[in-house]
Image (cartoon, rainbow, N blue to C red):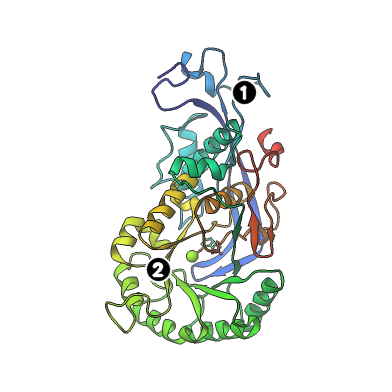
Amino acid sequence: MTADDPRGQGPVHAMRRRSFALDLTRPLGTARGAIRRREGFLIAVERGSDGDGAGSDGDGAGSDGDGAGSDEDGAVGLGEATPLPGWTESREACAAALDELDGRAILGSMPDAASTPAARHGVSLALADAAARDAEARLADRLADEAGVTATPADAVPVNATVGDGSPGETAAEAKRAVDEGFDCLKLKVGARDVDADVERVRAVREAVGDAVALRADANGAWDRETARRALDALADFDLAYVEQPLPADDLDGLAALREGDRPGRPSDGVPIAADESVAGRGIDAVLDAGAADAVVLKPMALGGPDRALAVALRARSAGVDPVVTTTIDAVVARTAAVHVAAAIPDVSPCGLATGSLLDEDLAPDPCPVVDGQIAVPTGPGLAGGAFEDLRRW
Ligand SMILES: O=C(O)CCC(=O)c1ccccc1C(=O)O
Ligand SMILES: [Mg+2]
C-alpha cells in the first residue's frame, strides 16, 4: 500500500467516458434477429498525478485532468464498452456501472464481470492499455505475461468472414466475394429460416467456393434437439469445420449428445460442435464439464474483458477444446483489443474478428485491417501505438 494505492488495489486512474453510436452498413441477419446498430462508450484512463497521489484527498483523481500533464504522468489508456443486450448488460446498466465508479478506475475494484461484462471490458481494457503503454509493450505481450503464457504472441491472426442470413444466391455471392478477398474460412449465419432452406444455402456456398475453404455455421441457439440432429445429418455432406450453438445456451447435455452423434460414447464422430452463448451464459467450467463442445467461441465484451477472455481461452485449450475469439460487432478499439487477445493464444484458429467492414462508420481508422484473411497485430505500445491519439485527447 502506497499513497498512490490507498487500499492496496492498484493505482487510482482518473476515468472519462463518452458515448457513441454506429450503424451497420446493412443489418446482420441472425437467428436471434438482425443487428443494425451498435451503441457504447469510449473510456479513457490516466493515472492520478496530483503530487502526493490520488489517495491524499479522496477525489483528487476524479477531478478533471489538466491536459497533457507532467512527465511523471502515466500513459492515457483507452477502452471500449459496447453492450449488446442478450449477450451483455443493457446500455443503461452499462452506463450505471460506469457511473458508479465516480470517475475513478482502479484495477482492484472493477465492475462485476457476470452482471456488467461490457462495463468491465471497457475499464479493464483501458487499464491494460495504459499499463502496456507505460511498459512500452504490445497489449498482446502484456496480456500473455499476466496470464502466464510463455509463448511469444503471434504477429498475425487468421480470421473468418462473417456472412449473415440471406437467400442461397445472396449467401453464395457474399461467400464468393469473401474468398476473392483472401478469406479461407467463412462463418455463415443459419437458423433464421427452416433447416431445408439453410441446407440449400450451405450447398450453394460450398458449390461457389469449392472444397478448400473452411466453412462454419452459426445457428445462435435456434434449434431444438430434434431439429438440430436433422440439421447436422443434412449438413454432414458439406464438410463443416463446426456448427456453432445449434441448441439453446442452457442445453449443455443436448450439445454433448449431438457431439456423440449416432455412436454414443464416441464424441466428435460427426460435425464438430462449438459453444458460444453457452459459454457466455453458463460459464466455461460448465461447458467443459458437460463435454458440450469441440470449440468455444469467446467474446471479450461478453466475458468481461480481454484478460478474462484470454483466461477462458487457456482454460479451454488445456481441456483440449479449441478457443476462437470473436467480437460482438464492436467499434475499432474493442476490435483491436480482441486481435491482441487472439494473438496471445498460441496457434489460434481463425477468429471472428473481421467485423469492422460490417460497420458503416467507425471511431477511428482501423489500425489492423484484414489482408488475405489475416489481421496483423499492431506493434504497439498498448493497443496500437499512436493510432488512437485523437480518441485519447477529447
Ligand atoms: O464470429 C464472427 O464471425 C463474428 C461475430 C458474430 O458472429 C456475432 C456478433 C454479434 C453477436 C453474436 C455473434 C455470434 O457469434 O453469435
Ligand atoms: Mg455465435
Question: Can you identify the residue that label 1 sits on?
Answer: 65
Sequence order check: which comes first, mark 2 or mark 1? Answer: 1
Mark 2: few/some/many CA within 10 Å (<14, 14-19, 20+): many
Instruction: Report which quarter residue 383 is drawn in.
Output: top right
Locate residue 220, reporting x and y percent: 46, 68
Q: Are marks 2 and 1 in contact (CB under 8 Å)?
A: no
Amino acid on which disc 2 is placed: Asp
* Residue in the foreground of this view, choosing between 321 and 127: 321
Amino acid on which disc 1 is placed: Gly
Instruction: Report which quarter residue 185 is drawn in.
Output: bottom right
The residues bearing labels 2 and 1 have C-alpha atoms spaced at a distance of: 48 Å
In this rendering, position of residue 302 left or right of residue 136: left
Please tell me whether mark 2 sits on a helix, a strand or a loop.
loop
Locate residue 19, reporting x and y percent: 61, 42
Q: Is residue 31 above or below residue 124?
A: below
Question: Residue 294 has which mark?
Answer: 2
Q: Is residue 15 above or below residue 376?
A: above
* Residue in the foreground of this view, choosing between 102 and 300: 300
Q: Is residue 300 above or below residue 215?
A: above
Q: Quadrant of the N terminus?
A: top left
Locate residue 301, reporting x and y percent: 50, 50
* Residue in the foreground of this view, choosing between 126 and 227: 126
Mark 1: few/some/many CA within 10 Å (<14, 14-19, 20+): some
Instruction: Report which quarter residue 259 is drawn in.
Output: bottom left
Q: Is residue 119 visible?
A: no
Q: Is mark 1 within 8 Å of ligand 1?
A: no
Q: Nearer the viewer, mark 2 or mark 1?
A: 2
Q: Is residue 253 visible?
A: yes
